Image (cartoon, rainbow, N blue to C red):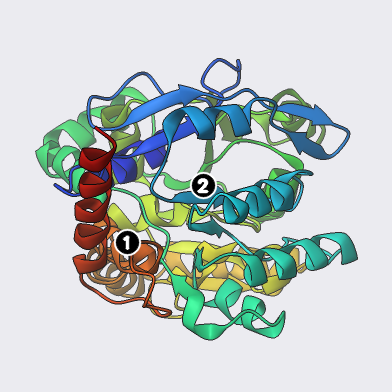
């Protein structure tokens, strides 16, 4: 599918004069994650997917590839896609250079089948675009040629967020705070779809413990998901429903900006994802757990003690202490706020991600190159050769 945070990246990629981007995705499936509403910069072809137990099957992929006639293909590196390796081999037989792009480690326990499939992807693909440093290391451990691997440093489009953030005045924030009876209250914020892997139940349990220690805190939960109703029942069972606000999914950036702007700390029990970028763009310090086995690639953005804090995984008391460290120490919170903004503006930004993407796909268009380079000469050469070939056919 095409979630909202990927659309700006595709638009930036397609804006290049030498790039014609076609994205194959299921744009008709009814789910909160499917947020494509049209774009003039890149083309989208509908490609449905079916779930067979835990596996993904994409009927029609091969016929779509034949119809598009791509110069190169980037496959989504999902080890649950049962015919992915056969599609890669089909591209090889037909002389279509291909790469693979994804997060190449599992959150949670490793599974032999996934390990094998990711290892095969790394051997077959000419380029391997990964989310960050960790999955790059793991692909090298699986035997992938290091020259193929390019960490993209997964990011979101902070420029759009910053434009909304900077347009909001302190008076608006104060008015928003008063209207919601949050004066003299500390706000803990979470923005995420409530799924099992995100462990909102752990955050609620930690907040229940925190509320027994102090009464000046409110927990604001933005996001829907399959466990939203269950989490509401848990909050009621824990006796904290009066201190927790379930706002459901919000996608309007101005509404999100007001909540981020009055939040004192952004908390997620684990598996933090791209929401860490969103929080740091608003200068909100982050608290999450320290277990790399349950964290995604975006965990690399957090620098413990610099732009946020980690708590000992499974220790609710330590979770509460780390939250209080930020809530009760304005100087620390201010320093972390500034460091978080610098981190996403200077290192984990979409401009850098696009540059690394273009460098990463360079070998697909230059048969003599085996390692990424920061130019687009190979792409230009490949297009010139294709134009010559098409003229000869005419």
| Mark 1 surroundings within 10 Å by alpha-carbon count, few (fewer than 14), some (14 through 19), many (20 or more) | many
Check the image and report above or below for 179 versus 321.
above
Check the image and report above or below for 128 versus 213.
below
Measured Cα–Cα span from mark 1 to mark 2: 37 Å
Q: Earlier in the sequence, mark 1 or mark 2?
A: 2
Q: x%, y% of residue 39?
A: 28, 25
State the residue in front, 185 or 168.
Answer: 168
Side (left or right) of 111 relative to 287: right
Q: Quadrant of the C terminus?
A: top left
> In the image, which is nearer the foreground, mark 1 or mark 2?
1
Check the image and report above or below for 330 versus 6.
below
Say which element carries label 2: strand
| Mark 2 surroundings within 10 Å by alpha-carbon count, few (fewer than 14), some (14 through 19), many (20 or more) | some
State the residue in front, 202 or 100.
Answer: 100
**Residue on which disc 2 sits:** 217
Q: x%, y% of residue 281?
A: 29, 55
Q: x%, y% of residue 374?
A: 24, 74
Q: Is residue 199 visible?
A: no
At 60% from the left and 36% from the top, the residue drawn is 193
Side (left or right) of 304 relative to 348: right
Say which element carries label 1: helix
**Residue on which disc 1 sits:** 353
């Amino acid at each position: 599918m095409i979630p909202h945070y990927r659309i700006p990246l595709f638009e930036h990629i397609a804006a290049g004069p030498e790039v014609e981007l076609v994205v194959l995705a299921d744009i008709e499936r009814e789910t909160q994650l499917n947020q494509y509403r049209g774009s003039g910069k890149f083309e989208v072809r509908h490609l449905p997917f079916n779930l067979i137990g835990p596996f993904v099957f994409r009927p029609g992929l091969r016929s779509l590839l034949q119809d598009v006639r791509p110069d190169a293909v980037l496959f989504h590196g999902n080890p649950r896609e049962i015919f992915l390796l056969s599609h890669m081999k089909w591209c090889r037989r037909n002389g279509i250079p291909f790469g693979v792009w994804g997060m190449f480690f599992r959150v949670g326990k490793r599974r032999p089948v996934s390990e094998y499939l990711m290892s095969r992807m790394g051997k077959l693909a000419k380029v391997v675009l990964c989310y960050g440093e960790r999955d790059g290391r793991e692909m090298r451990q699986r035997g992938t040629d290091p020259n193929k691997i390019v960490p993209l440093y997964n990011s979101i489009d902070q420029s759009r967020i910053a434009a909304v953030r900077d347009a909001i005045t302190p008076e608006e924030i104060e008015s928003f705070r008063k209207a919601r009876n949050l004066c003299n209250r500390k706000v803990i914020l979470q923005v995420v779809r409530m799924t099992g892997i995100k462990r909102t139940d752990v955050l609620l349990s930690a907040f229940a413990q925190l509320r027994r220690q102090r009464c000046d805190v409110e927990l604001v939960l933005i996001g829907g998901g399959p466990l939203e109703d269950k989490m509401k029942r848990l909050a009621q069972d824990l006796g904290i429903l009066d201190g927790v606000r379930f706002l459901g999914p919000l996608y309007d950036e101005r509404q999100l900006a007001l909540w981020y702007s009055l939040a004192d700390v952004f908390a997620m029990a684990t598996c933090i994802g791209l929401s860490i970028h969103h929080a740091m763009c608003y200068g909100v310090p982050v608290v999450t757990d320290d277990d790399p086995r349950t964290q995604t690639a975006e965990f690399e953005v957090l620098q413990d003690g610099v732009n946020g804090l980690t708590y000992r995984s499974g220790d609710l008391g330590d979770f509460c202490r780390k939250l209080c460290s930020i809530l009760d120490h304005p100087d620390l919170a201010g320093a972390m706020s500034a460091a978080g903004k610098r981190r996403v503006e200077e290192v984990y930004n979409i401009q850098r991600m696009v540059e690394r993407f273009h460098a990463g796909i360079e070998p697909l268009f230059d048969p003599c190159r085996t390692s990424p380079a920061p130019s687009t000469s190979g792409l230009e050469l490949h297009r010139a050769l294709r134009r010559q070939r098409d003229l000869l056919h005419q």
